[in-house]
Every structure is written in structure tokens, then in C-alpha cells.
Image (tube, helix red, strand yellow):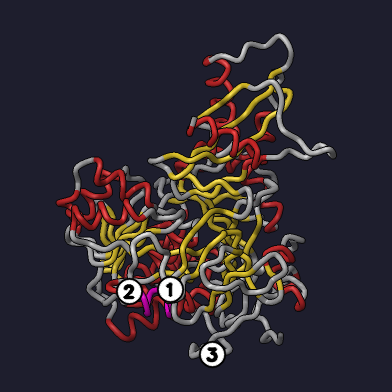
Amino acid sequence: MQLSPSAHADTFCRDSLPPPGQWPDLDLGDLSYPVRLNAADELLDATIAARGAYRRCLLAPGESWTYGDLLARASQVAGVLTEDLGLVPGNRVLLRGPNNPWMVACWFGVLKAGGVAVTTMPMLRTSELTTICDIARVSLALCDHRFTGELAAVPGVRIVAFGGGDSDDLAEAASRKSPEFSSVPTAADDVALIAFTSGTTGRPKATMHFHRDLLAVADTFSARVLRPGPDDLFAGTPPLAFTFGLGAVVLFPFRAGAASLLLEKATPAELADHIAAFDVTIVSTAPTAYRAMLAAGKADQLRGLRKPVSAGEHLPGPTWQAFHDATGVKIIDGIGSTEMLHIFIGSAGEEIRPGSTGREVPGYHAAILDADGKQVPDGEPGRLAVKGPTGCRYLNDPRQQAYVQDGWNITGDTYIRDADGYFWYQARSDDMIISGGYNIAGPEIEEVLLAHPDVAECGVVGVPDEARGQIVKAFVVLRAGTAGDEAKARELQDLVKGSIAPYKYPRSVEFVQSLPRTNTGKLQRFLLRLGDEAADNS
């Protein structure tokens, strides 16, 4: 593995890459990128050169930016970062806020300035933000003015707010900068972003992705499966902090010269209304939302879609069929991961088989392996493994050796491949909870619950749920003399909501006398799951 000379003066990211022997096999195939590559230039400047600055680019309720508008504002943000805030190439910049045009401008501004974007969800609490800033060594944040509260308590981070209209607002400072900025000539294999993903041990994992990776996912899944055109309008519910969302509303539309509708927050019913009102043609969301849109009676609003994409959790065959029956539109199911950046298995059009995730995205290779790393025969379950132009590179994390084995990226999912090359989801191979498209680590919730003085022990698992795929369930052993009633359950739920991102709270709390453990004291979460399923089936 030979890396190009870096343009980063701050070498933290490159110094934090895994040792060469722990990298996955990276195969660009027929993709080709120059040694010097800044993804912002390719997605904005090159698109403008090819298609013009006055094309629609970013839409939001009550707001519309052209490609030229976005380029100018991103360039001005880059000017503020380098001239006023002292950013040098390689510095990490935390971004916090909902999906809106200024968040996108900040993201591009960081890349143009040679920085590394660390985009976070606005729902995260101070403790979670502190951990992220500690892992990624972040000292500067650009934050939507409505979401500075939790971030303000993170030590050692300078916050520059935007959207508030104050004299020290980022937008005000940007307005005084030139709308032209010569992007830092980063290397194609310089780190462009750090994306955080939940770990089954509770501590988040930081995944590092190169500038070329951002183009590679657009040049594979988007170009070869979605096949968008410049007249398409993209939309989606995943936040930019999720690589699923970043691809869906930034990388894919801009690579194709298309436009993106940004929604800060939308219920499934509201999403359907926006799809109809703005004539959205490509949408990305979780299976939960597709089910909810149908349940809300919104089928008529969805018939204009060309390519709805489902990811984040398994799309059941009955959900696919119900959506197709109601709208005439075929959902593209896909599986991706933060470690791989985006979707690597998924099929469109006539190649779709309801209930199957699909075939390998052209450019990627997937296999089903046994516990010894050997490929199993078609029709037998095993661990899903994948290789391609992108792959896992954790930042200073020993879990790299668990995710990457013999050059394969081991996703943590159990699958079966059939004789026709279609992949069929069976279950998660680890303890990750996937609820409504969110990845949730049970140990993180257990840590919060154990801080309560009435909780002696607890175990948190995911249990099946028709609407959300899974929900978080907490099994709690209370200290002697404490009543396990509805009031106590609500108290514990509120504790979690107030301590970490609210979507992680246990929607079900069951009080038990003891927890199943091994002889060495290790919690056996699989027995909690089995016990719950047995109770449901009795």
C-alpha cells in the first residue's frame, strides 16, 4: 500500500490510519482518479464547468440555491476558515445541524479548505459530542445556531454559529469574503471526512474516508444502479452525519448535476407531501418510513417517484410488495455501512427480487464466509463479506482487526447467497440494534441506566417490532426494596432521553430478578433476545 504525498500540514488523520497489514483489499476496478483530487472541486466546480452555474442545486421549503450560489458560499466559508479561524489542511472541523443549505455549504467549505469534515447529528448530547471530539481531536465546530447548547459544554472546542443573523454569525463573516477560493490540492487518498458509527462495545468507531471514496460511491451505486440524470430531484430523511444521507442528498445528485431537496425534519406523512409538492424523483429513507407513508394514506403522493431507495435495515418482502401494489413503484433495497461509506449490494428495476437485498453493486464483490473465513456454498448462511473501491479504515481502533479479515470487510450481517447471485438477509451477526434505520449499541444505553441509583444490573437488546424492525428493550434488575412499576420505567426512559440521543431510549422496559450470564460473568444478550421472542410466540 503506497499513499500519495499528502497535502495535509496537520498529519493526524494519516498518522492514525491502520497499519498496512490491517487494510482491506481496495480495488478501484475501472474507476480512475488523479493523484491530486479535491472532491469539492469535482462535485461543484467541475459540475458547473460542464453544466452551468445557474442550474438548481439545493431546494428547501421557502429557499432555493443554484450551483453558483452554493459554490460562492462554500468558497466564502473556506475563506473564513483559513483567513479568520486559522484552519490548516488536515484540521478536523465538527459540523452540527439539520439538513439545510448552510450545512451543505459548510461541508463543502471544509473540504475546499483542505479540512476534514466531522459531521454529527443535532440530536447528540454533550457526552456523545465530547467523545467524538476526543477521538477525532476536534477543536473547531461550525454549528447551526439552534444547536449550540449541548456543544457549548464540550471542553476545548471553539464554536462558530450560523443561521442566527448575529454580527459574529458565520454567514455574516462569509459575506465579507471573496466568492472565489482556490481549493487546497489534496491527494486523492487524503482523508476528507470522519464518520462515526456505533460500536457494540458502546464506544463509537471513527471511520476515515478519502476524497476519492466520495466519488467512488457516486460512480458505482449511484451511476450504475440509480442512474440519475441532471433533471432528477433527490430527497431523503437520513441526516448528513449518516453516510447514507450524505450520499443520498449531496454526493449522488451533485455528481450527476442534479438537485437535492433538503428537509430539516419530516414525519413520513410530511415526507410524502414534500415528494409530491416538489416532484421528487429519487428518495432515500428506511423501511419504517415507507410503511408509515402507506399507513398514512399517502400512496397517491408517491407515484411520481422513479427510484425510491431503502437502506439502514432490512426491507421485508411484504413491505416491498405493499408499496408496489399501492404506487406501482419498485423500491431499491440496499445494504451499506459507514465503514464502506455507502451501498454495496442492491438492484434496480427488473433485477429486483422482493425480499432480497439484491446483487453486488458493479465494482464491489461480496461473499458469504464461515467462521474460518472460507466461502460457504450457495444456499448456506454465513457472514457477509465485501471488497471494492472503498473499505474500512478505523481511526486508531483495535476493532479494525475484527472488521477487516484477510482483506475482506466483515459487515456483521448473516446472509445467504442463492445460485443466481442474489443476497438474502438473515440476521445481524453481532449485538447491534437497528431500529427505524438507526444503529444503536446496547452497552451505551446500559451505561446510562447503570448510573441510576435504583438500577443494580441491566441488559439492553433489540427485539422484533413490526413498525420499526426492532425496538430497544431494557431488562432491568432493581436494587432491593425498589418497585418496578410503570412510573419507574418512565423514569428510566427519561434518563436515557436526557443523557444521550433520544432515539436510543428503550421503548420497552422489563423488570427482572436476574440476568443470564456466563460462568465468567459475561452478559448473554442472545438469551435475553431468545427469551423475549419465546414469550411473544407463546
Q: Amino acid at mark 3?
A: Pro
Q: Which residue is mark 1?
A: 359
Q: Secondary structure at mark 1?
A: loop
- Alpha-carbon distance for marks 3 and 2? 33 Å
> Which residue is the site of mark 2?
351
Q: Which residues are magenta?
A: 218-225
Circle 1 Cα neighbour tier, 10 Å, few/some/many (<14 / 14–19 / ≥20): many
Label 3: how many Cα within 10 Å (few below 14, some 14–19, many 20+): few
**Residue 215 visible in the displayed image:** yes
**Foreground: 99 or 208?**
208
Q: Is residue 195 left or right of residue 311?
A: right
Residue at image position (77%, 61%) is 398
Q: Quadrant of residue 196?
A: bottom right
- Work out whether residue 167 can be spotted: no
Residue 357 lies, with reference to residue 389, above or below; the image says above
Q: CA distance from mark 3 to mark 1?
A: 29 Å
Percent across and percent down for residue 274 are: 23, 51
Badge 2 or badge 1: first in the primary sequence: 2
Mark 2 → mark 1, Cα distance in angstroms: 8 Å
First-in-chain label (3 vs 1): 3
Which tag is nearer the camera, tag 3 or tag 2?
Answer: 2
Examine the image and state in which quarter residue 475 appears.
top right
Q: Amino acid at mark 1?
A: Arg
Q: Are marks 2 and 1 in contact (CB under 8 Å)?
A: yes
Residue at (71, 85) in percent of width and height: 1
Residue labelled with disc 3: 34
> Which secondary structure lies at badge 3?
loop
Q: Is residue 332 left or right of residue 374?
A: left
Disc 2 residue type (three-letter): Glu
